Every structure is written in C-alpha cells, then in structure tokens.
Image: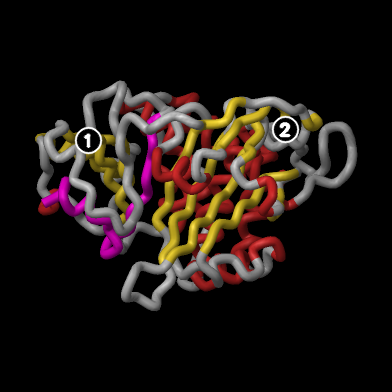
Amino acid sequence: MGFFDKLKDVAKEALKESGGGGGGASTGTRAGGGKTSDMEMLAGLVGNIMKTWGSTGPADTPKWQNTNIGQVGSDRDKELRKAAAESEAEFTGAGEEPGLEIWRVEKFKPVRQPKNTYGKFFTGDSYVVLHTYVNPGEAKHRYDLFYWQGAESTQDEKGSSAYFTVNLDDLLNCEAVQYREVEGSESDNFLALFNGNFAVQSGGVGAGWQEGGVPFTGTPDKTTYSGDSNDMIGARIPKQLVCVSDESGELQLSVVDEGTTVSKSKLHDSDPFVLIVGTPPKAEAVYVWMGARVSPQERLFCTDAIDCFLEQLGVDKHCSVTFVKEGKEPPQWKAYVV
C-alpha cells in the first residue's frame, strides 16, 4: 500500500472520529450526499489534528504519535511521499527552471496559476509559491518554498496548503527552505518576489471573483532573509531556543537556551526546535529547525501545527515562519545559533 493510500485510510478514520471533520461522513460520503474526495479526507485528518491539539490544552496534549498522523509512514516513507508528489499532475516540471511558480488550493487540489496573475492573491484562498534560483558561480538549483494563507481562507484550505508544501518539498528532494506567510504580515523576502506588484483582493475561488485590493508599494521596514543571504540584521535581538519533545509522553515546548545568540550544543537531531527572534508577542521572525532524524510525520505535523506552537509560546501567529533542515541551515540561522 502506498503512502497516499495509507493517508486516505488514516483520513477516513479521522473523519469517523470527528463526525466528518473535512465535510465528509465516516462512510466516505459527504453529509449531504456524494463521495468524499481524497483531499477532503486529508483535510479531515488535518482538522482532526488541530482539534486534538486545541481541545486538550498544553497540560494534557497527547504526544503526536498518539494522534492519527502517528500511524502514517514506513521505512520507505520518503520515497512513497515523493512518488505521491510526482503523481500530482499540477507539480509536473516544478523547479526545473529558475523563476516563480504559483499554485492555488482549489477544491483540495493544487492548481497552477497563469503568470499574468502572479502577485494577485485572494483573501479567501491559500497558495503555494515556489521560487527557484541559482547562485552566482553555482550550477545547482536552490528553492524558496512559501505557503501563503489568506485571512478568510478556510481551515481545510490552510491545511491543504501546508500539506502541499511538504509534498512539493519531497518532489524537490527536500532541498527547499520553507516559509509560512500570513495575509497582512508577509515577509520582505516574499514581497520582493513580486517587485512591488503584490495585491490582496477580496473574494476567493469559492466566493466568486471580486475586483479590488490594495497593491503593496511601500518600503519594507524590517529585513527578512533568503537562503543565501548574508544579512546580519537582528544579531543583537534577544532570542529563545525551544525544544518540541514528546519524550515524557506528552507534547512539550521547553526553552533550552536564550540570549542574543543561542548554543547549537542544545540541538539534537531527533526533535524539532523553534527559534524565536525578538520578544513575544511581536517576534521579528520564527524558525522551525528539523533535525536529521525528525520523521516525515513530525515534519508534516509541525508544518501544520505551527499556529498552535506560536500560541503556546505567546507569539503572534501572524509572525513570519521559516522551516530549516539540519545541514541546510541559511546564514542567518548560523549567525544566531553558534
């Protein structure tokens, strides 16, 4: 059985437990009739994870292995997940040439957007944005991978955008640096992709098309970074390094170091870590570091549950978030974690 088949089975179970969390019933049909699609079942799974986290609170939150997502995976999980990404026709050719590519979540599917719409986003939608580039003197392609979530986008769409981001990263052999972007708090790195032609319009794929929106034309007042940046702004800002662990049997967020820099000796490769740059709630940036032995299930869980992490850490959920992999850390991470 392939990864996506397993995921569907888990999603069916999630729908059964949640009474139809993604719009479907436990039998694989919608409450109003008709078959539940694969992605609707996936959305039910994502919604069930969020409900599990949100309903229990920090004191008695079960470790992620005890949620439905803990059932997913095998020794061949990485290969299977890449195969699932390759089977997504809309991702065909992704990252093969330098430039920008954008997909919008439409009815639980990633739909490639025409180039003449780049920079126009709808508040009721969620998107995946891939920036492929080559550094001077290199032949290797590098990738910045963003998922942008509109303020009025549904939880299912937001969950799907996070899932597709991980899915597409698998297709790119896990070489991408991932960023979560929230409407109204977009990072400078993201806005720079559109050369001042970024606009958010009302409406969305499920709400019809409405003209309007205000383009971004201002000068950014703070600096964020791409994977090859040497920018050292933020070196004097206080930071906290937080371990995400379930070793005790419960999911816990524990501060392991703090200061203007934090020690890389506090990291270990079996757990994710969160680096908060700045003083909550208005942190300048957040990084989620994934150790080499962090499982694909944990990667997916952390990507989707980041808002829950930020809430428990007292950080504004609209903060810019960058996902970092061990051995592929960008320069600013190396400047902060020494």
User: Which of 282 and 290 lies nearest the eye of the viewer?
Assistant: 282
The span picked out in magenta is 319-338
Image check: 115 left or right of 314?
Answer: right
Residue type at mark 2: give it.
Answer: Gly
Residue 188's x, y, as percent?
A: 40, 39
Residue 292's x, y, as percent?
A: 30, 63
Q: Marks 2 and 1, Cα distance to the nearest angstrom?
A: 39 Å
| Quadrant of the rendered image containing residue 63 | top left
Residue type at mark 1: give it.
Answer: Ser
User: Which of 81 and 143 lies nearest the eye of the viewer?
Assistant: 143
Q: Which residue is drawn at 33% across and 26% down?
A: 315
Q: In this rendering, is residue 244 above or below 228?
A: above
Q: Residue at x 64, y 63 (%)?
A: 91
Q: Is residue 334 magenta?
A: yes
Q: Which mark is residue 204?
A: 2
Q: Which residue is drawn at 35% across and 67% down?
A: 135
Residue beneath label 1, please? 254
| Quadrant of the rendered image containing residue 44 | top right
User: Which of 86 and 141 lies nearest the eye of the viewer?
Assistant: 141
Q: What element carries label 1?
A: strand
Q: Quadrant of the N terminus?
A: bottom right
Q: In this rendering, is residue 293 above or below 160?
A: below
